[in-house]
Image: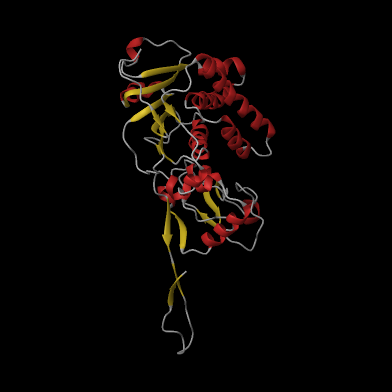
Amino acid sequence: MPVQKPISSVNDFVVRFANVNGSGSASANELFARSILRHGVPVSPRNIFPSNIQGLPTWYEVRVTEDGHLGARGGVDLMVAMNPQTWDKDLASIEPGGYLFYDSTKPMPSSKFRADISVIGVPLTAIANSTYTDPRQRQLFKNIIYLGALCALLDMDPKLIEQLISEQYKGKEKLLSSNVHALHLGRDWALQNLKCPIGLRVKKTDKVVALKDIRAEVELGYDVKLALGEAQRCLNCDIQTVFTAPLCIECDACVDICPMDCISFTQNGEEADLRQRLQAPSAHLDQDLYVADGLKTGRVMVKDEDVCLHCGLCAERCPTGAWDMQKYLIDMTYAGSSCPSKSRSAA
């Protein structure tokens, strides 16, 4: 039992995921952050990549903050420790009274823990191995299983996560049902075997309050009338998205957060073929695509300007500053001596 009193906080805490790069954890971690947004609570997520090489450590931090802070707070209240390579470092980063969540399939000596934190063990590997036979499925669904356990521990609404999964795998019923099943495997195990919820909780926020934050506003969505008004306002503003390819690490954070699915990373090709390989296939041939090459993998970034809202979520989410929102000017060119004296105007 921890000597330190466990941290107790609602809608104000920091969760850090310690994973192995290439383990398929990115989608589950992003799903966790977006599900909190669906509760109407602002979050500030960020990827931490010491290396972008498969098998090496990677971290993903989610600052849950009802006040809408964007910067890192410092310290970790809940550590989801899924990487044995970084265990000691991850353990040391937890605040006194914080929580350590880990895969307890293999017993660990008490010397590997701390007396001033609460330890939460879930046999993720054992649950995955007893349910799935394919090695890749075992790894991928283990990530969704820990998301389900966190759902119970933090008192989150599972229906909101199910809704996100259904949106992500729309038209792919087999993937949809298997991910929802994995979610409930973790949640049911936690409810049956652990004290839920813990001191950290996610509480739904009133929609009027939540919509004051741009990230919650886009995530929670609009009705048809408001969506049309906002789309016209955004598409006629003087702000555009600017992409700097050399800064991009292709983490797909912008792809995951985009509410319109207008950003894609894919192999280059003929325009007609390229338009069909986007996140949302582009059918309006009169609208040019924003294509940027120079990425380290040889792929290209493609943005469909026809559906972009210019909401800025890609720029907020990007961990390296590859995306930016910038004002622009239209420089009008005229012929003859009678051209207007003011040749420059804001778009």
Seen in the image, is 124 located left or right of residue 169?
left
Q: Which residue is drawn at 31% across and 35% down?
A: 74
x and y percent of residue 71 in the render?
35, 42
Q: Residue at x 58, y 37 (%)?
A: 164
> Is 26 situated above or below 255?
above
x and y percent of residue 230 in the render?
55, 57
Quadrant where the N terminus lies?
top left
Q: Residue furthest bottom?
A: 337
Q: Can residue 298 be seen in this view?
A: no
Q: Nearer the viewer, residue 54 or 153?
A: 153
Q: Residue at x 53, y 61 (%)?
A: 233
Q: Which of 253 and 189 is in front in this view?
A: 189
> Is 133 situated above or below 70?
above
> Is 42 situated above or below 98?
below
Q: Nearer the viewer, residue 318 or 164?
A: 164
Q: How many labels does the image show?
A: 0
Seen in the image, is 280 located left or right of residue 344?
right
> Is 169 situated above or below 127?
below
x and y percent of residue 241 in the render?
47, 56
Q: Is residue 147 visible?
A: yes
